[in-house]
């Protein structure tokens, strides 16, 4: 080895050692003036597509978990009229419901967003699935353009057609990803069997979602102001998790003055939170009775 290379090596070896320590995320103690200084190197997390939100409520993981999704956010304001944006209204409602559930205790709660973050649609049910949630509620508000008289809340569940179509696509996708549904690991060899398994899970999920939707209309009768036909179904991407029962709650119309007042006042938010929390409790109590 030439002298030049030896000198180079003397300089490069410590750099290589520190680099290797960095790569393995180790800390390097440096004795200095009688005190120990530690350099901590935070390594970026890999394979974490979205940070999972904090779960509030009892630490006991056997308690039921509800994931509340405030629609829109960030660059997507949702339905808006002057001074009112859907993304703000629904975040207010979501936080009121979260606070109410945490206050009453016994149920774990997480929000898909608790600030003005933009989330794509698919991320929302994905968060619920990854947290292994027992119930999912996506909160929205509607606009009726210049039809100021149109008002009232509606509850959407996933339509049957969209449900079986979603089941087939889910089976194909999860098949590739090697994931399971409801604790059943899908067989990578048999797409037909997978579709049946996912459809069975989807059907149970649909029944549970429909039951929760009925509880909202029952408990909200005379308290929440419902649309004349409050129960609807549609092909909503946000409700396509095959193993997490869920509804999309259209809380009312930003274009209707009474609805807008109800959705943005402390009193209106409290009524919503109280009613919805009661429906959630009854739902979980019934599910716990099931064999
Ligand atoms: Zn919306």
Image (cartoon, rainbow, N blue to C red):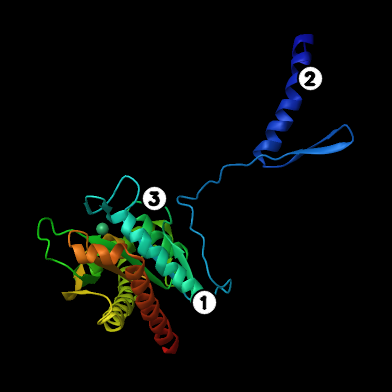
Report the image quarter containing ligand 1. Answer: bottom left
Q: Earlier in the sequence, mark 2 or mark 1?
A: 2
In the visual, does 122 lie left or right of 28?
left
Neighbor class of circle 1 (other Cα within 10 Å; few <14, some 14-19, many 20+) is: few
The response on whether ligand 1 sits within 8 Å of label 2 is: no
**Residue 202, percent from left and from top:** 31, 73
Q: Disc 2 marks which residue?
A: 10
As measured in the structure, the alpha-carbon distance from the residue carrying label 1 to the one carrying label 3 is: 26 Å
**Residue 110, percent from left and from top:** 46, 64
Q: Nearer the viewer, residue 215 or 133?
A: 215
In the visual, does 72 lie left or right of 109?
left
Q: Disc 3 marks which residue?
A: 116
As measured in the structure, the alpha-carbon distance from the residue carrying label 2 to the one carrying label 1 is: 62 Å
Q: Secondary structure at mark 2?
A: helix
Determine which of the numbered discs, if any, sits on residue 105 in the image: 1
- Nearer mark to the viewer, of 3 and 2: 3
């Amino acid at each position: 080895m030439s002298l030049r290379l030896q000198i180079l090596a003397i300089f490069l070896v410590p750099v290589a050692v520190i680099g290797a320590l960095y790569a393995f995320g180790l800390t390097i103690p440096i004795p200095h003036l009688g005190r120990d200084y530690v350099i901590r190197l935070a390594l970026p997390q890999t394979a974490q597509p979205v940070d999972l939100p904090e779960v509030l409520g009892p630490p006991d993981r056997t308690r039921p978990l509800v994931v509340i999704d405030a629609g829109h956010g960030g660059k997507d304001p949702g339905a808006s009229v002057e001074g009112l944006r859907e993304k703000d209204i629904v975040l207010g409602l979501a936080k009121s419901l979260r606070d109410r559930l945490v206050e009453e205790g016994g149920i774990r709660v997480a929000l898909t967003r608790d600030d003005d973050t933009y989330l794509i649609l698919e991320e929302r049910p994905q968060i619920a699935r990854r947290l292994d949630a027992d119930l999912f509620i996506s909160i929205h508000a509607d606009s009726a353009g210049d039809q100021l008289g149109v008002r009232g809340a509606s509850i959407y569940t996933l339509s049957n057609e969209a449900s079986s179509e979603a089941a087939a696509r889910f089976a194909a996708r999860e098949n590739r990803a090697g994931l399971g549904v409801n604790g059943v690991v899908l067989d990578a060899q048999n797409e037909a069997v997978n579709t049946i398994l996912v459809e069975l899970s989807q059907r149970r999920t649909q029944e549970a979602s429909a039951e929760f939707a009925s509880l909202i209309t029952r408990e909200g009768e005379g308290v929440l102001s419902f649309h004349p036909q409050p129960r609807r179904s549609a092909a909503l991407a946000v409700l396509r998790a095959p193993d997490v029962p869920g509804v999309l709650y259209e809380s009312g119309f930003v274009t209707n003055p009474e609805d807008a007042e109800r959705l943005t006042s402390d009193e209106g938010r409290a009524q919503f939170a109280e009613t919805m929390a009661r429906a959630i409790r009854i739902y979980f109590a019934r599910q716990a009775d099931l064999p």
